[in-house]
Structures are given as C-alpha cells and as structure tokens.
Image (tube, rainbow, N blue to C red):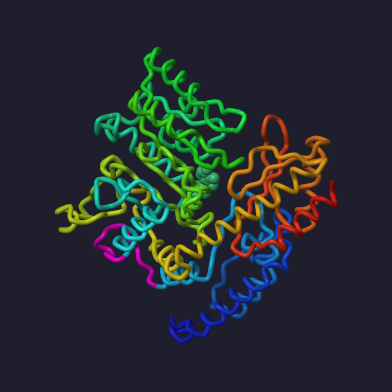
Amino acid sequence: MKQFDDEAFRKAGYEMIDWIADYHKNVESYPVLSKAQPGNILSKLPTKAPEMPESFSEIMKDVDDIIMPGITHWQSPNFFAFFPSNNSGPSVLGEMLSAGLGVQGMLWLTSPACTELEIKVLDWLVDLLDLPQMYKSTGAGGGVIQDTASSASLCALLAARHQVSEGNAPKTGMPDNFAAYTSDQAHSSMAKAANIAGMGTERLRMISTDENFAMQSEALEKAILEDKASGGQPFFVAATIGTTSTLANDPLPEIAEICKKHHCWLHVDAAMSGTAAICEEYRKIHKGLENADSYTFNPHKWMLTNFDCNAFYLKDRKMLTHTMSILPEYLRNAATEKSEVVDYRDWQVPLGRRFRALKLWFVLRMYGAEHIREMVRKHVGLAEDLAERIASHPKLVLAAPLSLNLVCFRHTDGNEKTQQIMEEINASGNAYLSHTKLNEHYVIRVSVGQAKTEKEHIDRLWGIIEDRC
Ligand SMILES: *Cc1c(COP(=O)(O)O)cnc(C)c1O
C-alpha cells in the first residue's frame, strides 16, 4: 500500500508512543468514569467506512475528540472499581512487538518461539508463586496462556469431563447425570462454563458459604452424597481463592480431601488473588493447592500485564489436550505427528492464538520479581490503611473481613445511603468504586490495584468518603 509504507509507520509509531506516554503521565487529570451517555460516541461516528485513505493525524484528532470522552480510565490511580486491570510500559512494549510480528501461534510449527517462550514464562511463574511443581511442563502437567479466567475454567470443566468419561467425552458429550459444584460466591464464569459445556446451570450446585463468604465444606460433601444417592455422577468442584465480591478463600485442604474421596476434579480459580503469592507472606492462600487438578490466575489483573493474559495450569495436560484435539489434514505436520512438541491449539477453545507470552516476559524481566512484590505489598498496605479508617468511623462498617487489597464497607444508615455515597463519588469523576450485595446489604468495594495508586490517592479517597458520611 502506497500511502502507508514502513517509513510512514515509523513516523506515526513515534507519535503513538508519545501519545501513550503523555496519556499515562496525565491519566489522573481525567474524570475516572466516562461521562458519556449511551449512544454519544456512536452518534459522532460516520455511518460509512471511508473509500479513500485518511491520515494518521486526522484519526488521532478523532481519538482525542470522540474516543477519549468515552474512555473510563482503568489506569488511573483513582480507579478502585471491580478488580484492577493494570498495565505497564514493558507490557505495552511486549504487546506492540506481538502485534508487529503478527504471529499466529496455533501450532509449534507456526512459530516455535511463540510456544517455547510461553512454556518457559509459565514455568517461571510456578516458581515465582511457589505453585506445586506438578504444574511445570517438565512432568505430566503444564501451563498455557488463555485469554481469560473464564476460558480457563471452561477448559478445566471439559478436562474433568474427559477424565471421568475415561476418554470418551468427545463422543458422548455431557451425560445428564453429571454434577458439578462451586460456591454461591463463585464468579459468574462458572455458571457460563456449565452452560457452554452443555450441562446447564441446574446441575452446577451452588454450595452455601459461611459468615466469611467461604465455601462450607460440609455442605459440599452433603450435596455430593445426595447426588450420588439419586444416581448422579459428581465430577467437578471449582473452589475460589479470592472471590470476586470479597476476596474470600474457600478452604482448599478440606475441599481437596472431599474431591479425593469422591473422585472429583478440583479446579482452583484464583483470578485476582493468585498474584499475591509472589510474596512469601501471602502464600498461605494456596495451602492445599498440591491436590488441585487445575489452577488459574490472571496476570492481566494485578501483575502489570495488560489484558488479555490468563495463566492456566494442569496437573495432567493430557486430560485437556485429548478432549480438545481434533487434527484435520491441513494442520498435519511432522513435529506434531511425532509428538515432539506442544501445540497450544489443543489447550484452548479457539484454534488461533496471539503471542501473549511476550508481554509477560517483558514485564517479568523489566520489573523483576522484586518490583512486582513491592507493588503487591504497597497495595495490600494501602488497603489495610483504608480499612482501619473505615472500621474506626462511627457511621461505617467493614462488610467483609479485609482480604489482601480489597476493602468492602457499608454505611450504617442502610442500603440507600451506601449506594448514594458511591454514586456521588463516581459522578464526581474523582474516583471510581463499584459495589456488591452481601446478605441483602448494599456494599461498596474498594479494590486497590492500579500501578500508580499511592498513599496520597487513598488519603484523598478517604477524604471524599468521609465528607459524604
Ligand atoms: C475476574 C474474575 C474472573 C473472570 O476473569 P476473566 O479473566 O475476565 O474471565 C473469574 N474468577 C474470579 C474469581 C475473578 O475475580
């Protein structure tokens, strides 16, 4: 193409980096939550795609005028909603290189480095988080980068089905007596996975939780026994380390014991909290993990690696690859036939895959584990600081035990008042908070996890919360 050759790319590329660097530098100056109303952005965009080329500078002008007003600033240090999706310079550089190489890594053959770097960085993470060694690629297990924890949990469910069907799963589908278990605080992706896997949500039993929102293991065993008594086949239990509402931890050692006894696959979803295990003092969250068949966490939440990047591990990779592998003639090749290599297409739902390991590799190398630990400790410390102030305020109460970097609280005047505080803060643009419901209480969640969040931001947030009490 004439208008946009390699030299034009070089020039625009420098400008783009400048733009992104300026954005990161000034991110705090925007209202955190976009003020756009539904349809605002849509109405400013032309109805038809252009017939003739437009310039980079024309497009960037529209980025400033049309796109930016519709951006919610996830990288703002005043972003405390949902869970973080933090990024970093090294991650963006790795992402850029991945796009620049334009590699599609479905098979080892289609870019050996794409597969082998992924194997290596995932093995690194096993050691960095002190995960069980069985998840390393050197034994029967192994790790893979998925787009999201949702996909990882779906894959875990499919691998479990394969194991219990003694390898017949692709032929027999999901028999209608199969039953799976998770807690009533588990992420919605578990219900979605059950639906996609064709078992429906009814046979995904939602086990009740205790006063700290952790799964009640006696209730789990009771449900399994009831299903067995009525001809059911329990096969899969998903435990959560760091639930989405409150970062509660299910009791892994007890759950693992029950899984063993009843021959159920144990999957552990630590999407957000997993990263904390990079620090020795938080590794206790993973106690019992040595008995889990699969495990997943999101470097794209709290590990400075921009979305999407999920790490998914299996104790026995064959259970997944055997259920996912379908080898059409056009993908046949010598390396695959000889089973000398990993073909990651067999570890995921799509065929094609991006070179996501690059950004994680850049992050791990350019920060070093020590700086990631520093960030995690900083966030946990800031959350503790905020929780103390909330606990000692006469009108506020902590709505769940403080866990790592998430503070949940409510106002003693009730749900309306709590909701009003949050909505006023969000509308002001000074910070962005989100909510959950716990035992009919409306609860504000403050999730501290953006790379640039410092004490001054927590002080300011506390100031604006206090003003509204
Ligand atoms: C965020 C979250 C998920 C979903 O993460 P995706 O990567 O967006 O699918 C799943 N489980 C838990 C516990 C989460 O906190």
Q: Residue at x 22, y 56 (%)?
A: 341
State whether residue 306 appears in this view.
Answer: no
Q: Residue at x 26, y 60 (%)?
A: 108
Viewer-proximal residue, 354 or 40?
A: 354
Q: Residue at x 38, y 40 (%)?
A: 156
State whether residue 319 appears in this view.
Answer: yes
Residue 229 part of the magenta-drawn span: no
Measured as percent of width and height from the top left, residue 22 is found at 63, 76
Measured as percent of width and height from the top left, residue 48 is found at 59, 65
Question: What secondary structure is the magenta-colored segment mainly?
Answer: loop
Measured as percent of width and height from the top left, residue 211 is found at 62, 29
Magenta region, residue range:
101-113
Measured as percent of width and height from the top left, residue 254 is found at 44, 29
Task: Note whether 101 is above or below 9 in the view shown.
Answer: above
Q: Quadrant of the N terminus?
A: bottom left
Q: Residue at x 33, y 56 (%)?
A: 123
| Number of on-image labels | 0
Given the current orientation, which residue lies at the most extreme top position?
229
Whether residue 177 sits left or right of residue 48 in the image: it is left
Viewer-proximal residue, 221 or 91?
A: 221
Whether residue 426 sits left or right of residue 342 in the image: it is right
